[in-house]
Amino acid sequence: MMKSKKLIKISQIFFFLFFLLIVNKLSAQEVIEGIHYFTGQPVRIEIKDGEIEKISSIKELEGNKPVYIAPGFFDNQVNGFAGVSFALGESDLTPAGVEKATRELWKNGVTTYLPTLTTNSTAVLIKNFATLSKAVDNKNLRGSIPGFHLEGPYINPEDGYRGAHPKQFVKLPDWDEFMRFYNASGGHIMQVTLAPEMEGALDFITKCSQKGIVVALGHHNADAQTVTAAIDRGAKITTHLGNGAANMINRHLNPFWSQLADDRLNISIICDGFHLLPEEIEVFYKVKGVENTIITSDVTHYAALEPGEYKTETGETIELTKEGKLYYPEQKVLYGSASPITNGVGHIMEVTGCSLGDAVKMASTNPARLYGLSDRGTLVPGKRADLILFTLDGFQVDIQKTWVAGELVYEK
């Protein structure tokens, strides 16, 4: 009798464990339906263990309003978001702040991004890189931050080309100093933006390329010969082409033509509707094409804040409009960007007439390829399930849901 009771108890335990196994297996699978961003056809995507397991065609979707499905956006230049600055020295950057910014970016369809540190003191850069280094392996962020972008301090110090970077911290390339930044980041600096005409810059580019770091040309006034030499040594992209340049330039001898002419060089462009004129975007797009163009935001920490007036770190008054324009109200000039990359996807479609598929490619597939992150950026079985569901109202992308590595992290 006792033996029989023990057998019953053991069998109950095994049944319970088997039940848990089935429940866990089912919970690890999720099915999402939407209109494929590239083909325009309704599809069903099955997710398992954080990856896309299967993509199937279906006849139609439920509901009246079309809902599109695409890989999450990849923004390679995020200076801050939702009140959290990665770049400023006065702000106290914390792991909690990085999480807050990331979750706010998820709401805008950004599933991968590079926190960007701009020109500042050596102490601030080391401190902020050390803080950010913890984000790469933070399980709560699910791999949304694969690395970082250092924009400066090795840029052209001239007014105009320097942009808003503080002149007192601009300097010549210094490999030993850079390695201090690199080590503080845990070896996760993925891109450096610099001016190739500065003394020592070409050798610096070679060393970065040998370490697998993407070199970008930006805030510079290099001649055509120097631009070619930089590309020969491994430079792969130009940072926010059309910005970070002086207002008055020589019509022939300027940094734009050589960068546009060389097919080896990708470009990133800010498509927020404020930083570039429509005709500039059209020309850049026509010259470089879909394959060599990347949409970036270059957003500051004022993005996602309420419209109104704010004081900068140096005490200047700036204004954020409800449309997302961030500017000095007295001088009527831009302070920086406050529009997420989501806006850029819609704006480039409106300006160039490109398809949704091409716009998403420039905001997701191309940056993933540039940084060697082959696990994301496309809807293909075996890739990370970094997905977004969204509607299109004219050219306005409205994010409905966001998945990161298979986990639903945002639902409107």
Image (cartoon, grey):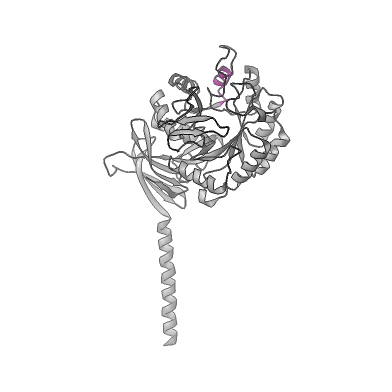
Residue closest to the far bottom: 1
Percent coordinates x, y for residue 318 in the rendering: 49, 30
Q: Residue at x 43, y 46 (%)?
A: 403
Side (left or right) of 46 relative to 249: left
Of 248 and 212, nearer the camera is 248
Percent coordinates x, y for residue 88 in the rendering: 59, 37
Of 157 and 368, nearer the camera is 157
Percent coordinates x, y for residue 324 in the rendering: 43, 31
Quadrant in which the C terminus is drawn: top left
Percent coordinates x, y for residue 23 in the rendering: 40, 62
Quadrant in which the N terminus is drawn: bottom left
Of 144 and 328, nearer the camera is 328
Q: Is residue 383 visible?
A: no
Q: Which residues are magenta?
A: 253-265
Name the quadrant containing residue 227.
Answer: top right
Name the quadrant containing residue 400.
Answer: top left
Q: Is residue 96 visible?
A: yes
Residue closest to the far left: 64
Name the quadrant containing residue 264.
Answer: top right
